[in-house]
Image (spheres, rainbow, N blue to C red):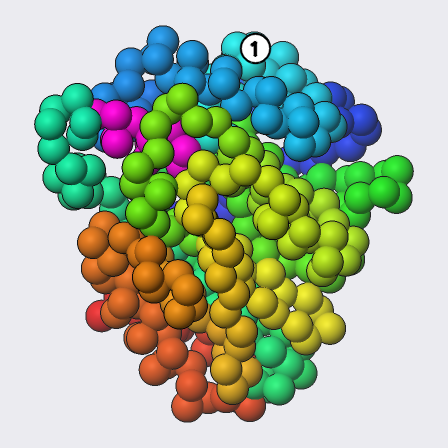
Amino acid sequence: MPQPPLPIITLRGTAYERGYQHGSQAGERIGLAIDIYLRHFDLQAGLAAAQVRRAAGRFVPAIERFDRELLAELHGLADGARRPLEDIVALNARNELLQSGMVVRAVKDGGGSAKFNFLFEPECTAVAILPSATCSGHTLLAQNLDWKTSVTASAIVLEIVQEDERRPSIATVTEAGTLARAGLNAAGLGLCVNFLNSRASSANRLGWAGVPTQLLRRSILNAWTFGDAVGPLYQVERCIASNYLVAHADGEALDFETAPEGIGRVEPAGGLLVHSNHFVSAWGRAIDTGIAVFPDSLWRIARLERRLRPRVGQIDVADLMAALRDHT
């Protein structure tokens, strides 16, 4: 059954004002998102609402050190939605809280975190197609978000108009109450993302709070240049593993497999760069624990390659959409 179009919310002004507009205009969806994730934090990670809010508060100092404007936007979001700041931070740190909480629960129950992997659902598959492989000569960038169907009710498109020229304007598909997920900006940079899991991620505890992945996604989209976009990935303290596929309209694409242990890179091959939920780089394969969580990740990346590779040089948007709709 076709889904209705996502609401588009335009944000302008200072960081706080943008956040307030987001919170006030998407308040109902933010409330839904908070309710959804509080249930999942409890089910998957064994975290009650009070524990979630305490854990979320531990991220605030790291966010402030990383980017005060993004923290101001989170404050505005909380005020606009009439929710505690900790609820909004929890939405923006949902990956960190879910994964870290599962570890705590596993330790408490005397077992390994793998026993809770059945609670995760298939995640994202992403692809960048360089101009040499497309029929139009343009870069194509796309992904599926095969996450929980319940979050459809909180999905939105943000058009973030940043008028001070320090940061480009952004369009991002995300969940209400969060700063960014996948998107593109006025500088021609685009971002797709994937969940990953590594040995150090699997050993993380709630007491370790670095910069949440949602903040890093927004930071990438806030950049005018490729270098400014990826620099923070190397500079921050990372709690968990995450994948960032960054492409540019000029025909460049690079993939960054980040983890607490370090960063691996994946480059396009024959005009294509495909990624799912396991490490592909030689460095990353040595620390990967994601295949145990998402064994279908191996199939998804192979299937997308198989659908697109024969069309290299002629790939169009219809080919890309058909490949991403393939559920065999």
- Indicate the position of residue 171 as horizontal and vertical percent values: 66, 48
- Indicate the position of residue 165 as horizontal and vertical percent values: 88, 44
Answer left or right for 8 relative to 288: right
Q: What element carries label 1?
A: loop
Along the line of sight, the residue nearer the viewer: 171 or 53: 53
Kind of residue indicated by mark 1: Arg
- Indicate the position of residue 27 as horizontal and vertical percent values: 54, 20
Q: Which residue is drawn at 37% across and 51% down?
A: 196
Rendered position, 49 above or below 59: above
- Where is the C terminus found, in terms of image quarters? bottom left
Whether the magenta-drawn stretch holds residue 185 is answered as: no
Whether residue 276 can be seen here: no
Image quadrant assignment for residue 26: top right
Instruction: Give the main secondary structure, helix, strand or loop, of the magenta stretch.
Output: helix
How many numbered circles are shown? 1
Q: Which residue is drawn at 12% across and 24% down?
A: 109
Along the line of sight, the residue nearer the viewer: 199 or 99: 199
Q: Residues within 10 Å of mark 1 (few under 14, many from 20)?
A: some
Answer left or right for 221 relative to 216: right
Answer left or right for 306 relative to 181: left
Rendered position, 87 above or below 313: above
Rendered position, 314 above or below 274: below
* Residue segment shown in magenta: 94-105
- Indicate the position of residue 29 as horizontal and vertical percent values: 48, 26
Instruction: Give the residue at mark 1.
Output: 82
Q: Which residue is drawn at 51% across and 86% down?
A: 270
Whether residue 247 can be seen here: yes
Q: Which residue lies furthest to the right in this view?
A: 164
Answer left or right for 186 relative to 125: right
Q: Residue at x 76, y 46 (%)?
A: 169
